[in-house]
Image (cartoon, helix red, strand yellow):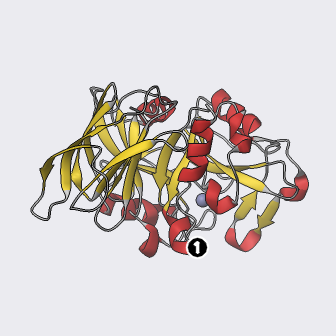
Amino acid sequence: MGSDPFDFEGVWLKCALHTHSTESDGDLAPSALVAAYADAGFDVLAITDHWRLTRWRSTSTLVELPAAELSCDIERPGMTCDVLVYGLSSVPDDPGGDERNWMVTEEEHWEQRTFPDLTTAGRFAEEEGAVAYLAHPYWTGMDAEPLLDAEFVAGLEVFNASGELECGRGDSSMVWDAALGAGRPLYGIATDDTHVAHLDVGRAWTSVKAEERSPDAVVDALRAGRFYASSGPVLDAVHRDGSAVEVHCSPCRALVLQMERERGCSVVAGDRGRRDGRVLETDDDGLITRAVLESTWEDPRYVRLKAVDAAGWAAWTNTL
Ligand SMILES: [Zn+2]
């Protein structure tokens, strides 16, 4: 599904898509956060303060992607989820949700209001010419159910680094697979969710293939799924030809094709693990830098790739 970032003529942009400044519950002022992400080699920064549009000027090296982290009610009483919106120009004063779930913490400038459901939040994004992604469903404690009939939601955070560092709830792959397996197409981004900058900056990112170096082009790429997500590995090329998928990547110990339940295949470095395909190139440590995965499963409902490096960090894409 989606638009293949590897075949698309354009520019790779390393994007930080979930960060907080002192305008909500982050520990750096916006200008310091901008400097931290420029130093870390990013091309695009979305400051996603809670229910606040924190604006700053693009610099010569870092593109401003206007963004915010908004919230909505979900069916379980008292429970809310968070939605990242990219490319918006305002946040609504009265989004129409249950006011018992609204909160304001003056000292942290922290504020939450809610939309009544995911579709209403997604429709708001659509009307803004923006694009919406569900934040950290595993950390929130959600299953895939609210996503299945949600309209105007392009995807979810497959990996949220802050959630992983805080409490081991960073990897929302299971929610992603449950939605994809139920026939709901979604893309997966990876983010820092920066609150404590010296711990969080640069732990996870989304590499977007954009038509040009501009916020509008990044929104277009996020809408089309033209990117891969990573907490470590770099994917240089991923090409699918029927049941075969060829991958060029930074050194990895495993490449896995994931499909609906009970299906999938993998190629693993070394003498342990599966070898459903061929390793074509390795580095001096025997880690895989080029391989072909060959699936024997016919007509999978979806296919996504996970590449895992020696330290266990991963990259994900489902634009195959
Ligand atoms: Zn956040």
Could you say whether the residue bearing mark 1 is in a helix, strand or loop?
helix
Q: Residue at x 43, y 27 (%)?
A: 298
Q: Position of residue 302 (x, y in %)?
A: 49, 33
Residue 220, horizontal then vertical, whole percent: 46, 29
Ligand 1 closer than 8 Å to the CB at disc 1?
no
Point out the quarter of the image occupied by ligand 1.
bottom right
289 horizontally vs 127: left or right: left
Q: Residue 136: percent from the left, percent from the top?
A: 60, 56
Q: Residue at x 66, y 53 (%)?
A: 52
Q: Quadrant of residue 41?
A: bottom left
Quadrant for the C terminus in the image? top left
Vertical arrangement, residue 164 with respect to residue 246, above or below: below
Q: Which residue is nearer to you in this view: 109 or 203? A: 203
Q: Is residue 138 left or right of residue 1?
A: right
Q: Tell me: residue 117, above or below residue 168.
A: above
Q: Quadrant of residue 108?
A: bottom right
Q: Nearer the viewer, residue 255 or 313?
A: 255
Given the image, on which type of amino acid does mark 1 rest? Cys
The residue that label 1 is drawn on is: 167
Rendering coords of residue 242 (x, y %): 33, 24
In this view, the residue in front, 240 or 117, is: 240
